[in-house]
Image (tube, rainbow, N blue to C red):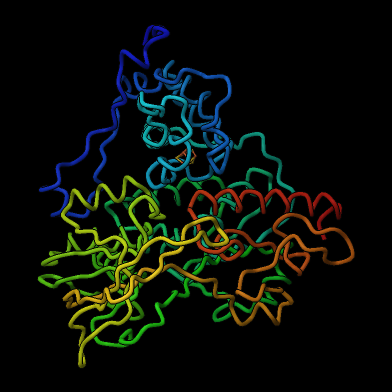
Amino acid sequence: MSKPSHLHFLETPRQDPKETPVPIRVRDWNEIYGQYDPAGAADQSARCINCGNPYCEWECPVHNYIPDWLRLVRQGRLFEAAELSHRTNSLPEICGRICPQDRLCEGACTLNDGLGAVTIGSIEKYITDEALKQGWRPDLSQVVATGRRVAIVGAGPAGLACADVLVRNGIEAVVFDRNARIGGLLTWGIPPFKLDKDVVETRREVLEGMGVSFRLGTEVGRDVDPDDLLAEFDAVFLGLGTYRYVTGGFPGEDLDGVVESLPFLIGNVHRVLGSSDERFPYVDVRGKRVVVLGGGDTAMDCVRTSIRQGAFSVTCVYRRDEANMPGSRREVKNARDEGVEFLFNRQPVAIRGSNAVEGVALVETALGTPDAGGRRRPEAVPDSEHALPADVVIVAFGFRPDPRDWMTGAGIAVHADGRVRVGDPAGGGPALPFQTSHPRVFAGGDMVRGADLVVTAVFEGREAAASIVRSFDRDGQAR
Ligand code: SF4
């Protein structure tokens, strides 16, 4: 592309990649967004005004060098853009797909003030998808092996990011996961219409090409003794996520037809992939009236999955107003476009039915005083109870950490709420970031901070790897 004019951002409007029309996309499980061609990616990248104070980088949890890789795309230097993109992000093609950009990089773009933010997420996705397709692979030719070995427990985003940084530092990384595929929630929790599972498989091939090895279908604490891991490896990283559900604590949650969000999503992914897991049976909502309780991205995944399964109706019930929903605005829009009804300022007080679900009792809410996090509390409006008929109720109130029993025996301390303690003084010296109370065990991602974004887990996995490298530097040569 020739040098764009200084007013390119005005002459060329923001243009997202093509979206599959609603009547077609709700009939399959394919990703709904297409891909730029090279000219389209260059044209959109050229909209960056290089404002000199890139707030986008600061709002990006991994602090991507966004204006720099946008410039490389504009210049057609795709492989250099891919190399640069991987300097800060281990899973750029995945974050480009699923980050809530409207709350992060794009929300902070200077052009977001009425002119249309640069399509940062879509260009990040384009860079790696296209570079990999054209044969680019991360360059590890200068890496010198250290002889150190690290076991990574959990092949989710934190574990994969940790492995990526370790092998780039000459440290062997062996990743254990109880599932047959890598990815954790990337594979099992996020629906295929947001993240195609082939994308995760391609990332597995890339990581294996870099020297990462995977021991899948292997659960630490069941198939492998944690003490053996500590004996075999120089350090251990824990990235086990959060899988314990938050319940509503109201009557009727044990009725037939009440399901938790994650088992619902996992059972559905298995069905789409043609596999099964008896712990997560397929829940079929075809022809049913579905009510989803909650307003986060997991709730949006459940409503959009229900639509694609052929539910008769899908209603999302959220206790605050739309402006205070925790999920991505884009996901709410997509859900609405696909036919989901939203009921805001409604709080469930009971699920009704004799044996099976017949409906949800709701009260109206008004927003009261702010809570500790600054969000206004929903308060029930007196005498406002009413019924919403339902055949299936999906509870999507979020997740809590669930530390494994073996951690206590291994000397890994947890907070009262179950999150793993990291960065506390341990072993006679100041602890490194993401170092647990066991000096050779590190942890990061949701099991440390509580349920959060994929990109935040990536950041913490990378930071934990940096701490592992420093811990090896501190105690000299290999044991
Ligand atoms: Fe934006 Fe997420 Fe990519 Fe950062 S990682 S640039 S927040 S899409």
Residue reaching furthest right?
Answer: 428
Determine whether, in the image, residue 261 is placed left or right of residue 289.
Answer: right
- Residue lying at 52% horizontally and 65% vertically, measured from the top left: 241
Residue 388 in percent (x, y) is at: 19, 74
What residue is rendered at 53% in x and 44% in y?
90
For the N terminus, the image quarter is top left
Give residue 240's quadrant in the image: bottom right
- Residue 39: horizontal and vertical position, in percent? 31, 19
**Which of 112 and 262 lies nearest the eye of the viewer?**
112
- For the C terminus, which image quadrant? bottom right
Image spot of residue 203 (x, y percent): 44, 48
Q: Please state which of residues 170 and 404 is positioned toward the viewer in this rendering.
A: 404
Q: Is residue 147 above or below residue 279?
A: above
Using the image, determine if residue 420 lies above or below residue 430: below
What is the tally of numbered marks visible in this picture? 0
Left or right position of 382 against 376: left
Q: x%, y% of residue 191?
A: 31, 58
Choose between 288 and 432: the one closer to the eye. 288
Give me the residue at 76% from left, 69% from top: 438
In the drawing, does residue 243 fall left or right of residue 354? right
Q: Residue furthest bottom?
A: 354
Question: Against 322, is 394 above or below?
Answer: below
Q: Is residue 156 left or right of residue 302?
A: right
In this view, the residue in front, 256 or 126, is 256
| Residue 134 quadrant | top left
